[in-house]
Image (spheres, rainbow, N blue to C red):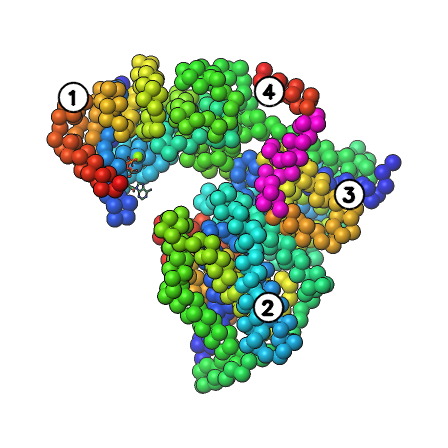
Amino acid sequence: MFNGYVITIAVFVGIWVSLALSLNILVGYAGQISLGHAAFFGIGAYTSAVMTVRYGQSFWAGLLAAILITGIVGAILGLPSLRVRHDFLVLATMGVNFVVVAVFKYVDFFGGAMGIVNLPAPSLFGVSFRGGALYMALVWLYAGFVLLISWYLSKTWAGLALNTVRIDEDAAAAVGVSVPRFKIYAFAISAALAGGAGSFYAHFIGSVFPDTFAFVESIAILSMVIIGGVGTLRGPIFGAILLKSAPEFLRFAQDYRFTIYGALLVLMMLFQPSGLLGDDSWLWTLGKRIFRRPAASMQAEEAS
Amino acid sequence: MPFLQNLSNALVLASTYVLMAAGLTMVYGVLKVLHIAHAAVYTIGAFIGLLVFSWLGNFWLALLVAMIGSGIVGVIIYRTTYYYMLDAPRIVPLITSIGLFVMLTDLLQKGFLMGPYQRAFPAGGAGMPRIRTSFISITPKQMLVLVVTIVLMTLVYLLLTRTRIGLGWQAASMDRDMAAAVGVNLNRVVALNFFLGSALAGAGGVLVGVYNNSVFATMGDLVSYKAFIIIVLGGMGSLPGVIVASVLLAIVENFMVAWVGYVLPRDAIAFLVLILMLMFRPHGLLGKE
Amino acid sequence: MTELRVEHVSKRFGGLQALQDVSLQTEGEILGLIGPNGAGKTTLFNIISGFLPPTSGTITYDGRALHKQHPHQIVRLGIARTFQIIKPFGDLSVLENVLSGIGMPVYPSARALFQRYRTSATLKQAHAILAQTDLQDWAQAPAANLPIGLQRRLEIARALATRPHLLLLDEPAAGLTTHEAEDLALLIRSLHAQGIDIIVIEHNMSFAMNLCERIVVLAQGQIIANDTPAVIQQDERVINAYLGQEEADVAHS
Ligand SMILES: Nc1ncnc2c1ncn2[C@@H]1O[C@H](COP(=O)(O)OP(=O)(O)OP(=O)(O)O)[C@@H](O)[C@H]1O
Ligand SMILES: [Mg+2]
């Protein structure tokens, strides 16, 4: 039913949906703009690679370690956000990305520019997942998990607290929200989920190289979040599907990938800063009008 | 005397940083926008300079056209994007600048513009003298970079302190609304700001292109990251701060490479310094609260 | 009785002495804090609520030192505040603004990551506060869409949601119509009747005189009077401080 090419695309889209959703927790929920998300992606991939190739652990142990370790590193690398805001945080996270990639590249333990190769494929009860529809299902299961966490988080006190931090840090503190604590939560959760995506990526490709996780990838992930609609759940999912799959189908979009990302970012900021599917975007409003009935019943539900 | 030699090398490096960072800091001063796309303007300047030079063979004409060209590119960027975002939340111009940067750098690498390869810029020292004494030697190329930078920065300084529009610029960088209230034509001031800043970056691109005898599409990236470090060190929006910080960074880099071995590459260290700076001296080395 | 003690607090901003050896304490009343523009009133609130450190001096509440604590810790001790320049959570609904205050006890614990914030219990509390502040009709509206007078009321509602024992109100009546100000005075009195101590900064003299049982007058960072409204009204130094202010205002316009 699925040929290899379609599966490959579907796996990539699933991984980038997870990445965009995880970055959305940081940017959309907590309001911390980060240009270093690829670093967390990379830390997850490398953790999993080291665990499986260097220490002979299973994929599952690698995945778990990737999530945990990236979460911890995320909490630490979130420290600059306690001191600096806005433009400066962008610079700091960009710097973090460069430093992390440099560490992968220049520290022998991580294989240097040659990376780490021969990562095992996951298997469960003797069934291998390599390259097949099963792996795709696994990746999408993970994307669903990230979506579930994002959704649930928005319903918790922490979700409300992150909203207050994003809107006004002083007012947040005045209602008892410890701004540093919740920023670090956001960094840790966002990083941990990106780390898991890194593990899935690494074991799908079977190898990791430093440059995959360079600064431009951070820009790509941020573009997906912003172009789709920052702060919503549908936005980053849509953005990731759109930006990750279009280059696979359109040759032009492949060659001009970053020109398109950049132009879209600028156009969005000029005409639709809340994103294609943001709450007040024309596309979303139009959709709501066409599907008026479901929308109306949703509002009724909200009111009850 | 390796010390003096290192120092003169550092000053040459610092000059290129100054030209790049001056524009960034000027834009930040007035618009409070981190103009990340400035890196692309620098590269465009180098590219225009190279085109004119290979066509006419005259370095000074190439420099002039490159400055005017990149100045115009800067103004166009401003009028088509940031101009509409003066009152938007800060995230809006910030993301715009990221988008512009990605778009322009990617476009420049395409075959119909610069392509993905390096090109030579064989302008030599443009007739500058060589200085060689027993303890220091300055090549014509180094002379060229130093002299052009000093002349340009002096001109900008005079323009900003001695002319009406320059005073308007100073007022606007202190308080935009207040300046508008006392009758400063903000639009002209900001446009001039972009023109000057971008022209300086363009000049920087040409000089570095000549100095390294190489021009390529991503040549602006590294310098612009350094320029971010410099404008933070220099205390965001301050021109003298930029000059001091450029010299400082260049000296530190030069001496670190000359005397100390390193584990991480130079640029990663520069970024570590940036992160620490942002955390512990967010108002710059010279700045205060 | 829980009391706030401010002892010898001074605050310097560079060359500007914003507060100079300020001492005062609450005695369970509605305390007015008045003074001309730039007297240091808001600065004093900022110091009490932990947004600024004092240059010197101590502040205790219920015997506990406040001046080394962060704002979010001070709310937990039972001191809530509003802002002179209001800071509503504009994209959140009025209801969610109030809920954000109700979450105060949960935020420090890991439960914050797992517990949902809309439960029947929290919604009930929130609606009670909305009813008390007469905002119930606006519950679902984004806070930014409220008229300015109601946004000021929302500031108070949000602070109330943290269940304070002491409420610091920074010019709650600014920009209100006379009618709205009267409603506000009623609200403040009813809060006080529930046992909440109140310090209120106010520019409008008659509003302060009617509402407060005691008034502290700040001028140029120093307390120049601390007495009942009747006495304050007669105090020459207060009259001079305000006259100077009015002359300055006239000269401005
Ligand atoms: N964070 C700050 N940094 C520097 N100066 C400040 C700061 N906060 C207040 N000031 C200065 O301290 C002085 C007192 O200010 P404050 O806001 O406390 O006055 P106020 O009594 O609340 O006045 P108003 O009635 O206008 O609200 C003013 O001169 C003000 O400019
Ligand atoms: Mg005040």
- Measure the C-alpha gap from mark 2 to mark 1: 77 Å
Residue type beneath disc 4:
Glu
A287, above or below C125, in the image: below
Give the label, 2 or 3, closer to the camera: 2
Q: Which residues are magenta?
A: A267-291
Q: Is residue C6 inside the magenta stretch? A: no
Query: Which residue has dot 2 on it?
Result: B46
Residue C13 appears anywhere in the view: yes
Mark nearer the viewer, 3 or 4: 4
Question: Magenta span has A288?
Answer: yes
Q: Chain of mark 4?
A: A
Q: CA distance from mark 3 to mark 1?
A: 80 Å
The residue identified by callout 1 is C230
Mark 3: amino acid: Ile
Alpha-carbon distance for marks 2 and 4?
Answer: 58 Å
Q: Are marks 3 and 4 on the same chain?
A: yes
Q: Is residue A262 above or below residue A289?
A: below
Kind of residue indicated by mark 2: Ala
Q: Chain of mark 3?
A: A
Secondary structure under tag 1 reads: helix
Q: Mark 2 vs mark 3: tell me if same chain.
A: no
- The reply to whether residue B236 is in sight is no
Which residue does the image show at 48% across and 68% down from the upper left? Answer: B14
Identity, as a three-letter code, of the amino acid under mark 1: Ala
Q: Within 10 Å of the Cα at label 4, are there few (<14), some (14-19), or many (20+) other Cα atoms?
A: few
Q: Quadrant of residue C218?
A: top left
Sooner in the amino-acid sequence: mark 3 or mark 4: 3
